[in-house]
Amino acid sequence: MIPIGIRFAPGVVALSLLGVSFPAGAQTAGPAARTVAKSSAASEPEFTPPAADAIPEGEFGKMVRKGQDIFLRTSEHAGQYVGNGMNCVSCHIDAGRRKNASPLWAAYVLYPAYRAKNGHVNTLAERLQGCFRYSMNGAMPPADSETIVALESYMYWLAKGAPTGVKLAGQGFKSLPPPAQKADYTRGQKVFQENCVLCHAANGQGQSADGHMVFPALWGDDSYNWGAGMHSVATAAAFIKANMPLSKGYSLTDQQAWDVAYFMNAHDRPQDPRFEGSVEETRKKYHDSSSDLYGQTINGKVLGAGATPAGGTLRKQ
Ligand code: HEC
Ligand code: HEC
């Protein structure tokens, strides 16, 4: 992991946190081992993706590298589909390798799959299109575009040797048990000030260096939109517990993770692209859950009512 001492030298921070040296870190220590063994605890098989330096040469390898580049620096390599300051790696930590940060190798083997979100069986391509539409607040690349082919190639390569149709240990985000005390804005604000502002800034807008977002925005126009999975307090709490503060996963208590997730998602962000014309209608149709703050009134404001339209200013038009 990155020693705290070099974290604030902007050049180094930009490179390591944008994933350039990240994937070459701890993960490359061993051989390109592909272990598929039963984990006794959860009976979900363990899996280790190939080392980052094991991408093959040739045309296929080129496409895998292109997918990795898109994943690490999304607006630079697929900017026409990106409407915020995020990269895929902003949430899928360590170049999409980290367990409990929705790793790509675990996702690859689970598609096609039925999704309640849109009520039909989704191919992997459609799943990836959704990431651009919601998490990246952007536009959907065509299913046969090079962007999707490259991402699928990268995922396929990371999953080399994994069993298909099996939930692998570390897939997705590990949900937390319901909080002992109802998640709370004021307590969450305190957790935020003590543990998050260092990187994500006091206004939650993150920090960039050399034109790259290094510490991504937690809310506002440069963040994920109201249709993204991370806008659910439960999903955000699960992500934060395992992965934040960066390199200090599992240091917050469950309660702190719930509180800070609530605080974060109690701020406005770009509109849900499925907006039905009114926040009430949109909430009824897509956000009818207690873990979902869209359309709720917090600090006198209806969340979603002041949201900027989805899509942002799509970069590199
Ligand atoms: C703001 C955080 C965030 C960003 C940015 C993001 N994702 Fe995700 N991603 C999530 C969350 C949260 C989920 C789980 C959503 C759910 O099902 O509730 C997810 C799910 C996925 C899945 C399915 C995982 C599985 O196991 O089924 C894939 C594949 C994926 N994302 C790829 C991408 C790609 C590619 C990008 C960039 C184009 C991207 N994501 C950007 C947060 C993010
Ligand atoms: C040491 C710096 C650091 C600290 C402290 C930190 N983060 Fe992060 N956080 C990051 C980085 C860097 C990323 C993106 C990961 C990447 O690009 O590799 C990130 C990503 C995220 C994301 C997903 C992307 C987004 O912007 O929505 C969330 C949510 C998040 N952090 C929440 C938090 C919360 C809540 C805290 C405090 C409990 C926290 N972080 C503390 C550095 C930090």
Image: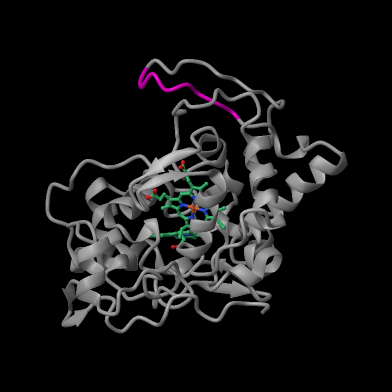
Percent x, y for residue 135? 47, 62
The image quadrant where one finds the C terminus is bottom right
Task: Please tell me which residue is depicted at 37% across the width and 53% down the height of the picture.
Answer: 118
Q: Is residue 193 above or below residue 36?
A: below
Q: Does the segment drawn in magenta span residue 47? A: yes
Q: Is residue 283 left or right of residue 246?
A: left
Percent x, y for residue 83? 54, 73
Farthest residue, direction left: 181
Percent x, y for residue 60? 80, 41
Q: Is residue 17 left or right of residue 106?
A: right
| Quarter of image, res 301 | bottom left
Near-viewer residue (50 or 271): 271
Q: Is residue 132 above or below residue 207?
A: above
Q: Does the segment drawn in magenta span residue 244? A: no
Q: Is residue 21 visible?
A: no
Task: Please tell me which residue is depicted at 31% across the width and 52% down the height of the picture.
Answer: 237
Percent x, y for residue 180? 13, 47
Which range is magenta? Answer: 41-48
Near-viewer residue (34 or 134): 134
Q: Is residue 181 left or right of residue 151?
A: left
Judged by its main secondary structure, the magenta piece is loop
